[in-house]
Image (cartoon, helix red, strand yellow):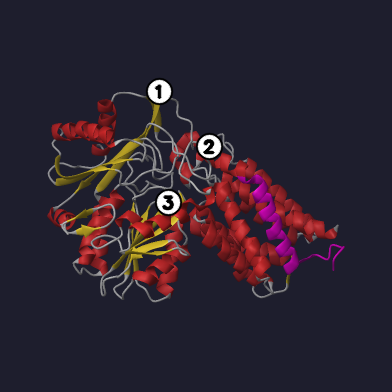
Amino acid sequence: MKKFIDAPSEVLADALKGVAAAHPELAVDFADRVVARANPKPGKVALISGGGSGHEPLHSGFVGPGMLDAACAGEVFTSPTPDQMLAAAQAVSTGAGALFIVKNYTGDVLNFEMAAELAEAEGIAVKTVLVADDVAVEDSTWTAGRRGVGTTVFVEKIAGAAAEEGADLDAVHAVATRVSENGRSMGVALTSATLPSVGKPSFDLPEDEIEMGVGIHGEPGRTRAPLTSASEIAETLVSAILADHDFTGAPVIAMLSGLGGTPLIELYLMYGAVASLLEQRGVTVARVLVGDYITSLDMAGCSLTLLRADDEMLRLWDAPVSTAALRWGV
Amino acid sequence: MAGSDDGRLTVDDLVAWMFRFDERIAAEADRLTALDSAIGDADHGTNIARGTGAVRKRLADAPPDDAGALLKSSGMALVSTVGGASGSLYGTLFLEMAKSVGPTPELDTAGLADAFRAGVAGVVARGRAEPGDKTMVDALQPAAEALSAAAEGGRPIVESLREAAAAAALGRDATIPLVARKGRASYLGERSADHLDPGATSAAILVQALADARSERIG
C-alpha cells in the first residue's frame, strides 16, 4: 500500500500543519490538536465536536462561521482525549455555553463525558447531543448502540446555523437533538481501509465480496455479501433506511458520502440509483450532498444518509456557511 | 526492605510496575493490534503503547513522592495520550486507585486490594460493562477478587499478586467464546465469538507486570 507519509507516527501532526497552512482563517492548536475559528463570535453558543482522524473532512473541514467553532482531532480512528476537548471549550466558549456533538462510539462517549465534567468544573455550561444513526447496527440493546455517522454533518450544519443566529444553548441543543433523532444512515464497503500506522488493510475483503452495513473505522459490517450491481446495492441501502424511519410526507435532506476511495463518478452513479428508488417510494428529496463528507481513510464504498427535515431545519440548512468543506450563501 | 518479602508495595515498586507494563506492552503491541484487527479497529497495541511510553517518560521526568501521586500521574498520562475507550478506562482505573490510596508511601496487600477493587469499580461505572461482556473487565474483575481473597487470607504480597495475575489470565482466556456486548467488537454480533478480547489481554498484561515487578525485587 502506497501512501503520502513522512513518518507513520506523525501523520496527524503533519496533516494539521497543512490545515493551518491552507486555512489562515482557522486557529490550529498543535499541542492540543484543536482546529478552531480564529475569532469566536462573542455571546454565541460554542459548537464543539471531534473524533478520531481519518474521516476528513469531518470534523475540522466543518469549522467556520455557520457550523462548528472547534474540532478536536484524535489519532486515526481513535477518540480524542478529555484534555483536548477542555482546551477546545476554553478556546471558543464566550459565556453562552458549549454544545458537544458526539458520535456514538464508546471511546468518544467516555472521553466527551470526562471532558464535560472538567468543563463544568471550569464554569462552562455543556450540553451534549449524541448521534447514533447507523441502521446497520440492528441489536442496539446488546451492543454499544448504533454508531454515529452521516447525520453528524447535518447536526453540525443545522445546529451551527441556529447558534450563529443567536439561539441559546437549550434551543441549539433542542434542534440538534431533533436532527439527530430524524437522521438515518447505512454504508457499504467495496474494500477495507489501511491505517497509516499499520500499513495493511484492517480486514480482508475478497475481490468479489462487499461488506454491507460497514462502519467508518475499518471494522467489518453487518453482513458480507457477493459483489452485485450498483442498483442492487442502492436498493439494499435505501430499503434498510426506509424500514427504520418514515421519510414520507416531509422534505428530506440526502447525503451520499464517499468513504474516501471511491471516485465521484461512481458516487453520482449511486446517487442516481438512490434518487429513483426514493422517488418510487414517495420520498421527496429537498436538498442533496454528493461527495466525500465522512470518510474512512482510503476505503472504497459509500454511505447514504437521509434526514427527515422540517421547514426550520431546511431554513437553517440553507443559511450561510463558510468552512473548508461546506460553503454557500457567503 | 529489599531482598525479602516485607509484604509491602513501595513507590519504587509501583514505578517498576509501570516500567514493566511499558516493556511488556511494547513487546506485545503488534499482537494486541492483531487481536484488535480481528474484532475491533486494529489500533489497541499502538494506542496502549503510546500511553505506557508517556507514563514512563512522566515518571522518569518527575518521580512522584507517594503512591497516590504516582497512580494519579500515571492515570492522567494514560487519559491524555491513549485516546479511545481504552484511554478513558485505563485512566479511570488509575485515578480511582489514586483516590483510594491517597498520599501514602507504601501499601500492604489489603491496601492494594482495596485500591484495585475501587479502580475496577470505576472502570465498570464509566464503561457500563459487566463481566461477560468481552471487555477488559473480564480480566480485571477476577484479579480484583483474587487480590481481595488473598488479602483476607493474610497471604504474602508476592503470592497474592501471582494469584491475581493467574486470575486475570484465566479471565482473559475466558473471553474467547464470548459474544461482545460493549465496545466496537459488539457491532460484529456472533462474529465476535472465538476471538481473544484485546482489552482483556492488555489488562492481564497490566496485572502480570505488577506481579513480575514485585517478585523481581525479592530476587
Rendered image: mark on residue A53 = 3
> Are discs 2 and 1 both within one chain?
no
B85 relative position to B165: left or right? left
> Label 1 sits on what residue type?
Asp
A10 relative position to B57: left or right? left
The range drawn in magenta is B1-29
Quick check: is B12 in the magenta stretch?
yes
Q: Which residue is mark 1?
A: A208
The image quarter in which residue A227 lies: top left
At which x and y percent is residue A2? Answer: 47, 37
> Label 3 sits on what residue type?
Ser
Rendered image: mark on residue B28 = none
Mark 1 belongs to chain: A
Rendered image: mark on residue B38 = 2
How far, Cα to Cα, is label 3 from label 1? Answer: 29 Å
Mark 3 belongs to chain: A
Mark 2 belongs to chain: B
User: Which one is closest to the eye, mark 2 or mark 3?
Assistant: 3
Residue drawn at 21 percent across, 68 percent down:
A167
Is the Cβ of the residue at disc 2 closer than 8 Å to that at disc 3? no
> Are discs 3 and 1 both within one chain?
yes
Frontmost residue, B47 versus B145: B47
Label 3 crowd bin: few (<14), some (14–19), many (20+), radius 10 Å = many
Q: Callout 3: helix, strand or loop?
A: strand
Q: Is residue A282 above or below residue A116?
A: above
Q: Callout 2: helix, strand or loop?
A: helix
How far, Cα to Cα, is label 2 from label 3? Answer: 21 Å
At which x and y percent is residue A139? Answer: 39, 41
